[in-house]
Image (cartoon, grey):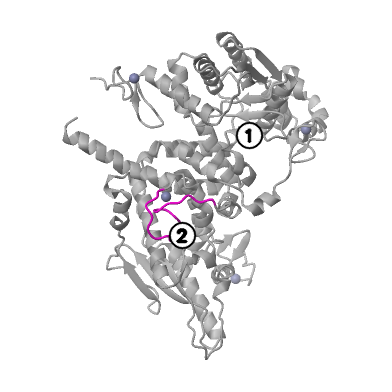
Amino acid sequence: MKPVCENCFKNDAALKRPRNGMKVCKECFFMLFETEIHQTIVDNQLFARNETVAIGASGGKDSTVLASVLKTLNARYDYGVNFVLLSIDEGIKGYRDDSLETVKRNQVQYDMPLEILSYDKLYGWTMDKIVAQIGKKNNCTYCGVFRRQALDRGCVQNSIGHVVTGHNADDVAETVLMNLMRGDIQRLDRCCDIVTGDSSSRVKRSKPLMYCYEKEIVLYAHYKNLDYFSTECTYSPEAFRGTARALIKNLEAVRPSAILDVIHSGKQFQLSKKSKARQVRAVQCSQCSYISSNTVCKACVLLNGLNASEPKLRLTEDEGGAALPVRVLEKLQF
Amino acid sequence: MECTRCGKDSTISTRGEKFCDDCFVDFLNRKIRPQLTHFRVNGSPDSKTVSPLIVVPINFRAASLALVDMLVNMRKLQMQKHKQMDGFRILCLYIGDLSDDVSWPWPEVDFEQIELNVSSIEQPIGIDSDTLTRSSKQDLEKIMTRQMILAYAKKHEAFTAFAYSMTKLSEITLAETVKGRGANLPALVTPDLMLDKVVYPLRDITSSELEKYCKITGLNKYIIPDAPVPSVTKRQSIDEIVHLYFTKVQEEFPSVVSTVSKISSRLSQTGEECGLCQPRYIGKSVKLCYACASIAKETEMKRKLDILDMYEL
Ligand SMILES: [Zn+2]
Ligand SMILES: [Zn+2]
Ligand SMILES: [Zn+2]
Ligand SMILES: [Zn+2]
């Protein structure tokens, strides 16, 4: 005999919820999962009626589930929000090409307008070109810094004041641990805020899925047959982040609530008065006017570095800017 | 290679320096002094005041044995220099059962043992340790041990010197974060000597340095080894997983340990009221924090299941 759903006590249970072990049927799982996100939205007053909100859409499972759930909730609870899909084209062959196709299909499936912003247009560099230049070692730093700004810049270009991203509970917990290990106290202070960006920044950011377990997002996408692109970024993440992720998985195995427990701790972390006094005030980047803690923002610093060393690369760059062949060529020259 | 300090053959390499055995032991003995400036010799030889008492909790691992050794050395030195006057007195405390074949290296140092009494705190709070997961049970026992030590020290109007190394403090930081007790970190990891009467003299020494210390000084033979960690991850406790993780990460990224051990000093004391895990001694309170409430929930869930079993539901 199959166990009965512990929520409706009518249907057979189809799955065990990773966050609390509750056995539920498919319909109850959808309802519980969606209602929890709705609760997060209401508790934190994330949206205002008639607001236009961009969904940072990568074509991956998180942002696809986010778009799908927001569309459902917007209709069910009449938020009155206009959602727009905002996609970034980092210029990674084989990764972004396919995922952008996914986003284009999502545009039709969810009936939302789509804006695509390319690194090439925004910065004059694709990720493939950057990797060809600097190798695979720190490329996630570049990608992260550029992506962060790209969403903001895209919003400003389209006069949108709010962007939501698909960061889930696992991501947030991982970030807490990473910031702890790096001793990055400023970020530790903020990384569990559901809304980031103060009055001085032009674009508000929020994370409606920050209490959703990654495993449940995968289950939701699976049972709803959502159309998403499931390949990991071809450029592997930093080693350190990898170990933090592995740690979270181990902890979750022993104690499923561990992910939420880390977030609970993260929310308690507050800078001491002394550390706060040392905190750097935000200013506008002198090159691109993006809000930054330095006179030149991180993206511009990285760009300046790339542009300064570019001529050397031009000698070996072949058609299409494919990353690996260039690296091979560089080595052969020695 | 030669010892950077005295030129003899070096045996140890740490912190980018080479040490011989003697210089290494001397180096570590000096490392605890910045934490203990409060316990300098104070007063004249004929004054009647007694020096403050320091309770040193012992668990017979390398860190606590090394700490007692260092404190004994420090006190000896004080008495040599100041006509038999000391800056503090030492009282060692062991919580739990102790087998008869355990020997105590310092006959001149007072040693007391008390049983761990988990049930005294369980009932008012509604936790029954028999219903808990292995991880929560371990957590509860550690919390109780600390509370008993602090209560004992309070009764004796003493300070407490815990043998937390830099490595241990960073593990505590990570583990308590994982358990949802981030709010406790400043009070737990960077206590205030005068306010809390608690001090961590080993906070600038790593656990592997302490292990070497015990090897050189012959304290090794008094060490009781750690209980084995289950090999299956699912059976491990949060503390054990974090410990294993740190052991691995510090090989690859050695600076992580000191970074993490220092982070609490830059956080503000927020604190969640809790009758169980409060790092400071607070006496009785039935309020539970987020993390301890979830331990209590395990007992509640188990009782519900037992009732269902009883009625064969
Ligand atoms: Zn159901
Ligand atoms: Zn800039
Ligand atoms: Zn020497
Ligand atoms: Zn507590």
Residue A209 appears in the figure:
no
- In the rendered image, the quadrant that contains the C terminus of chain A is top right
* Dot 1: element: strand
* Residue shown at 55% from the left, 40% from the top: A176
> Which chain's residue wears label 2?
B
Toward the left, the furthest residue is B311
- How many numbered callouts? 2
Q: Where is residue A113 in the image (x, y as percent from the top left)?
A: 64, 12
> Which residue occupies the foreground of this view, A94 or B85?
B85
> Height in image: A266 above or below A45?
below
* Label 1: how many Cα within 10 Å (few below 14, some 14–19, many 20+): some
Q: In the image, is residue A58 above or below residue A284?
A: above
Of the 4 image quadrants, the one containing the N terminus of chain A is top left
Q: Count neighbours of disc 2 (C-alpha within 10 A) and say few if under 14, some if 14 to 19, many if 20 or more.
A: some
Q: Dividing the picture into quarters, in which one does residue A193 lie? A: top right
Return the chain for callout 1. Answer: A
Return the x and y of residue B58 as percentages of the image width and height: 40, 65
The verdict on label 1 being within 8 Å of ligand 2 is no
Q: Does the magenta stretch include residue B274?
A: yes
Question: Which amino acid type corresponds to the residue marked 2 in the rendered image?
Answer: Arg
Q: How far apart are marks 1 and 2 (CA)?
A: 34 Å
B225 in the magenta segment? no
Secondary structure at badge 2 equals loop
Decide: is B219 above or below A3.
below
- Residue annotated with mark 1: A196
Q: Nearer the viewer, residue B280 or B98?
A: B280
Relative depth, front residue between B313 and A178: B313
**Residue at the location (46% across, 22% down)?**
A34
Is B76 on the left-hand or right-hand side of A11? right
Span of residues in magenta: B270-288
Which of the 4 quarters of the picture holds residue A282? Answer: top right
Mark 2 highlights which residue?
B280
